């Protein structure tokens, strides 16, 4: 196995070093390059009489630069699949290749390093540390990675600028609206320059206007910076931003279709005046 995924530290890895937020005219990853491959992935919970097959043999190929919405009813296996894709959990059977590397053969520590280096996470509930400034929240993944303080601060400030939160660096989550908190969470997800952002119902706690703003942000990260976006959503209006919609039903992929006319008109992220938004 290549040792690419098992090094730690900011300079290790497959990619040449890039500015903290890629510069717009240069995609982070060559579009179309194979990034993720699942083959026959199953996930079994429990054993014997209580055994439950949450995933019943998933095949999925994801290329660099895709924007995919994952839909399906509650209990259909979306979170289980996202946990596996995010290297937070492992399949019971089957194969997961990330950039050609068989993830199931990595140790827990190696998977954690893969996660820190290549993946960013955004959650419905924002999952920010309370009583901790926006800047420090965004610095956190860089702290885990061992980056020096000055570099952490610079990269975190740049990520906050990229999500339109310049001037809010020292606000705590309680001093920010829901939409702004989700922007901080997105800045935290992208500060490590991930190949993939996995977003689990990122607009689930937001009103319609803020939801579209967050989608505009994810769209810009995908379109302008080449970040692959995988997003679970229940909302057809939000899934409409994705160029591909994968629907789970009862532990299987029931449909996998291209959206020929994705929504492309969400507002661009913009710096907000002090005292800003309401939601
Ligand atoms: P979704 O995200 O689509 O709502 P999940 O992936 O959370 O679906 O769940 C799929 C199935 O697996 C459900 O029947 C759920 O109850 C079950 N499940 C999920 N996580 C666990 C777990 N940790 N232990 C046992 N069963 C689980």
Image (spheres, helix red, strand yellow):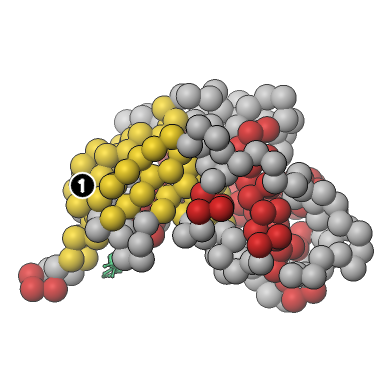
Q: Is residue 92 visible?
A: yes
Q: Secondary structure at mark 1?
A: strand
Q: Nearer the viewer, residue 235 or 51?
A: 235
The number of numbered discs placed on residues in the rendered structure image is: 1
Mark 1 sits on what residue?
A: 57
Residue 161, image x and y in percent? 80, 48
Q: Is residue 84 visible?
A: no
The C terminus lies in which quarter of the figure?
A: bottom right
Q: Residue furthest left?
A: 48
Residue 203, image x and y in percent? 59, 61
The N terminus lies in which quarter of the figure?
A: top left
Q: Nearer the viewer, residue 268 or 198?
A: 268
Give the quadrant of ligand 1. Answer: bottom left
- The residue carrying pointer 1 sits among few (fewer than 14), some (14 to 19) or many (20 or more) residues within 10 Å by Cα, namely some
Q: Nearer the viewer, residue 265 or 108?
A: 265
Left/right placement of residue 269 relative to residue 98 reads right
Residue 205, image x and y in percent? 60, 69
Q: Nearer the viewer, residue 144 or 236?
A: 236
Rendered residue at 25%/50% (across/down): 252
Rendered residue at 31%/65% (across/down): 75
Rendered residue at 70%/68% (across/down): 178
Residue 209, image x and y in percent? 71, 60
The answer to whether the beta carbon of the residue marked 1 is less than 8 Å from any atom of ligand 1 is no
Left/right placement of residue 169 relative to residue 51 reads right
């Amino acid at each position: 196995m290549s040792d690419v995924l098992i090094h730690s530290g900011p300079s290790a890895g497959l990619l040449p070093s890039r500015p903290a937020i890629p510069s717009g005219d240069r995609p982070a990853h060559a579009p179309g390059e194979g990034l993720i491959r699942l083959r026959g992935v199953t996930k079994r919970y429990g054993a014997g009489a209580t055994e439950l097959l949450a995933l019943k043999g998933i095949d999925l190929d994801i290329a660099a630069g895709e924007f995919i919405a994952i839909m399906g009813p509650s209990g259909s296996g979306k979170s289980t699949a996202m946990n596996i894709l995010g290297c937070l959990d492992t399949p019971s059977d089957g194969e997961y290749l990330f950039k050609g590397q068989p993830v199931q053969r990595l140790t827990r520590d190696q998977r954690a390093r893969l996660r820190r280096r290549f993946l960013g996470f955004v959650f419905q509930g924002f999952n920010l540390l309370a009583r901790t400034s926006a800047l420090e929240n965004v610095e956190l993944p860089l702290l885990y990675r061992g980056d020096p303080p000055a570099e952490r601060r610079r990269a975190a400030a740049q990520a906050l600028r990229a999500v339109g939160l310049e001037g809010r660096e020292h606000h705590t989550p309680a001093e920010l609206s829901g939409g702004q908190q989700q922007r901080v969470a997105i800045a935290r997800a992208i500060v490590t320059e991930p190949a993939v952002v996995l977003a689990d119902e990122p607009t689930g706690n937001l009103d319609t206007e803020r939801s579209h703003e967050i989608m505009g942000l994810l769209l810009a990260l995908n379109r302008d910076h080449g970040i692959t976006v995988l997003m679970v959503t229940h909302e057809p209006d939000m899934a409409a931003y994705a160029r591909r919609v994968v629907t789970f039903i009862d532990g299987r992929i029931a449909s996998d279709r291209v959206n020929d006319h994705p929504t492309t008109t969400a507002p661009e992220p913009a710096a907000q005046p002090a005292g800003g938004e309401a939601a």
